[in-house]
Image (cartoon, helix red, strand yellow):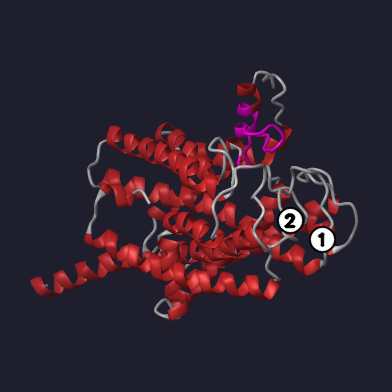
Amino acid sequence: MSTATALDESIEQVKKTVGRFEFLDFARGLVMIIMAWDHVSGFWNELHHGSEGIFGQAPPFVNTLWFLLRFVSHYCAPTFIFLAGTVLAISTARRIKKGESEKSVSLHLIKRGIALLFLEAAFVSPAFSNPWTYFGVIACIGVCLIIFSVARKLPTKLILAAGVLIVLNHSFLNLSFIPTRPNWGWYLRVILHEPNFQRWPYVGLYPIIPWLGVMSIGWAFGNFLESKSGEEIRKLRNPLYLTGIGSIIAFIIVRYLNGYGNLIPRMGNTLVDWLYVSKYPPDVAFLLWTLGGMCLMLGTGIVLEERGMLGNRLVSGVLTIGRNPLFFYLVHLWLYRARWPDFTPGYGTPPFFLDLPTTLLFWAGGVVVLWYLCREYEKLKRQYPKPILQYI
């Protein structure tokens, strides 16, 4: 074999290795775009409802369309957190393969976790007109990263088993042994497993325990992917589709039985009754539906790659957003908010409300702007590979 031929084969192998996880970016990009819709709707629509799980049964929706426009956003947090675990496992494995010390890897995760906690307090919470103590999805991921700086050393099978155990059983957890007075006890319960907005400013929506379970399963999936070649990963298309469909069927069964797995019982047989499930905290029904949908997105990403459609403008745009999720998240909040924060309970009152068609146009136009900004930010990271840029 000539040197030139060997070099060509080596380059081709690198390309396959780098591109074999683009289906993850595709799924992540999709849910980021959907998430942008949910937030622009929350900022500007008077009839937008959320907080599923905190206030019990569903509030009155104007019609089913308004409900579905909120419901579609449920895919976002589970996919975002699951894939955070997946990408974390892949990046950690690569760091170790490059010869980075265990101590260095752990410190990196701790620093990233602290950075996310800072970003939540300084940039994310004000965007929602929440106090800096608000415990949201970015803070939750930050704490999970710190936990994984230690937990990653456990066997993958043990992490997977723990994750599944948490997801299936966290609803039985009783934190009544933690006092609600003084406020630190209340806040601890909020950030561990009892999301609510009852005692301002000690509020939060994304408790650590259930979402750590989701991230743990994502971590196991990432370690599984890291051991596979590009060709082997492409063969995951059908298993992902079957897993997604099976998960959705399981969701229907759980809602039909109306017992275990439903923190919000089904009160009737309307579409809203069937689909109004607990997100805060996520119950089994919620995660079956959303993670099942995530599997379908991942399978579709593999199909698009097989058909050579990753270069398509729309698909490429989704991939660009998916490669820069945190940057997109931070920028989109302030782009769509478009007003100064009002630090009172809730999102604050906008100067006016938008109707549905106008809100959709605002969202679509914002996505185009965000795609452009993500593309330019990606170029900046390549041009200046400074550590500070890699944290966002």
Confirm whether residue 292 shows in the render.
no
Is residue 342 among what the camera can see? yes
Q: Residue at x 58, y 49 (%)?
A: 128
Residue 16: percent from left, percent from top? 32, 67
Q: What stretch is highlighted in magenta?
A: 187-206
The amino acid marked with disc number 1 is Phe
Q: What secondary structure is found at the residue carrying circle 1?
A: loop
Identify the mark at residue 181; answer none if there is no mark. Answer: none
**Quadrant where the N terminus lies?**
bottom left
The answer to whether 260 is drawn above or below residue 236 in the figure is: above
| Mark-to-mark CA distance, 1 and 2 | 8 Å
243 lies left or right of 275: left
Check the image and report above or below for 177 versus 329: above
From the top left corner, tell me how far across and down residue 31 is, in percent. Answer: 55, 62
Q: From the viewer's perspective, is 282 left or right of 384?
A: right
Instruction: Name the residue: 14% across, 74% down.
Output: 5
Tell me residue 54's x, y (percent). Answer: 74, 42
Q: In this view, does 220 lie above or below 179?
A: below
Q: What residue do we see at 53% from left, 38% from top?
A: 132
**Is 189 one of the magenta-colored residues?**
yes
Give the residue furthest to the right. 268
Q: How crowded is mark 2: few (under 14 residues within 10 Å), some or many (20 or more)?
A: some
Is residue 108 positioned above or below 265 on the image? Answer: above
Q: Is residue 383 left or right of residue 193?
A: left
Question: Label 1, on which residue?
Answer: 61
Viewer-closest of 179 and 157: 179
